[in-house]
Amino acid sequence: MELSIAIEDTSKCSALFGATDTNLRAIRAAFDVRIAARDGCIHLVGSPEAVRKAADAVESLQRKLRTSRELVDGDIEAAITRANRPDCADDVDALDVFGNHAAIKPKSASQAAYVRAILANDATFCLGPAGSGKTYLGVAVALMMLKRKQIERIVLARPAVEAGEKLGYLPGDLQAKVNPFLRPLFDALNDMMGLDQIKRFMENDVVEVIPLAFMRGRTLNRAVIILDEAQNTTIAQMLMVLTRMGMGSKMIVTADQSQTDLAPGQPSGVQDAVRRLGGVKGVAVVQLAKADIVRHPLVQRIVEAYGRDGSKDR
């Protein structure tokens, strides 16, 4: 397995690597991995379990350096010890997924509860306003599980429902028409992975981004299936996608019920599913709120303004 970890602050490379790369050598010896630093990344090669543990150790050191200019005696030993903990995969603080920016983790108590619900349940419904991290955190957890070999693939799906426009008016073939609907999922991936890695994963069917209609008839084993914008599914579509789960899989369903684009009078599949499945063992329902919005600060004020008169937040 190969994994590239972006160095968060290149001005602290000397502290991260240690004098004459002693920290990197300690990680290499502890986990029997090949490790090298180049092009602003730390590259790890080894068995999946060894690479996961080595990545956790690097992650711990980078977290430490966010609030400190140097690492002190014992930090590298503590990072290695923590990475060897058998319960590390279930620690929300260890969620960090490496990307082009800062490490990713929950930013509120509700978001942390959402992550814990995904890890503890086979199906998780997350309801909340725009910008509250529903899709972003779901993708981050899925990538974490993929890197740790807890799953073998990620399937990201969205219903292709028009917001006031018709697919037939758009130029291009079918793929060109549906790509705009899937763009938000690609945006989340792009923020967490390099373009080359995304391309490689998609070519090998490790990551699949598809319209909801393409899910029919499939059984997905050892996968995380993320259904985004689920407020735009019908009851029949929701039943179809929920029954795609195979052995060793998890389902994450996200929805903003203030942005429904279904025809007037058409019941929402996510509302029906939450009503039916809310008390079923293995199913969790998490509600995020305006306080959990982590986009531009103005987004929270916009959501509040539109919510005061019950208008749709488009």
Image (cartoon, rainbow, N blue to C red):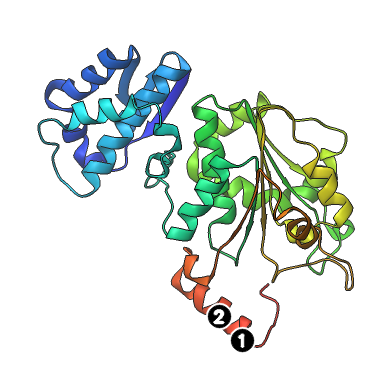
Q: Where is residue 76 in the image (x, y as percent from the top left)?
A: 20, 28
Image point (89%, 52%), residue name: 236
Alpha carbon distance from label 1 to label 2: 6 Å
Query: Which residue does the image show at 47% across and 18% down from the upper left?
Result: 48
**Hey, which residue is sitting farthest bottom in the picture?**
309
Residue 95 circle label: none
Is 64 located above or below residue 236 in the figure?
A: above
Asked if the residue at tag 2 contacts the one at tag 1, i.e. Cβ–Cβ closer than 8 Å, the answer is yes
Q: How many labels does the image show?
A: 2
* Residue linked to disc 2: 304
Residue positioned 55% across, 30% down in the render: 146
Say which quarter of the image contains residue 87: top left
110 or 143: which is nearer to us? 110
> Is residue 231 shown above or below 69?
below
Q: Disc 1 marks which residue?
A: 308
Amino acid found under the numbered disc labelled 1: Arg
Q: Is residue 3 left or right of residue 40?
A: right
- Can residue 189 be seen? no
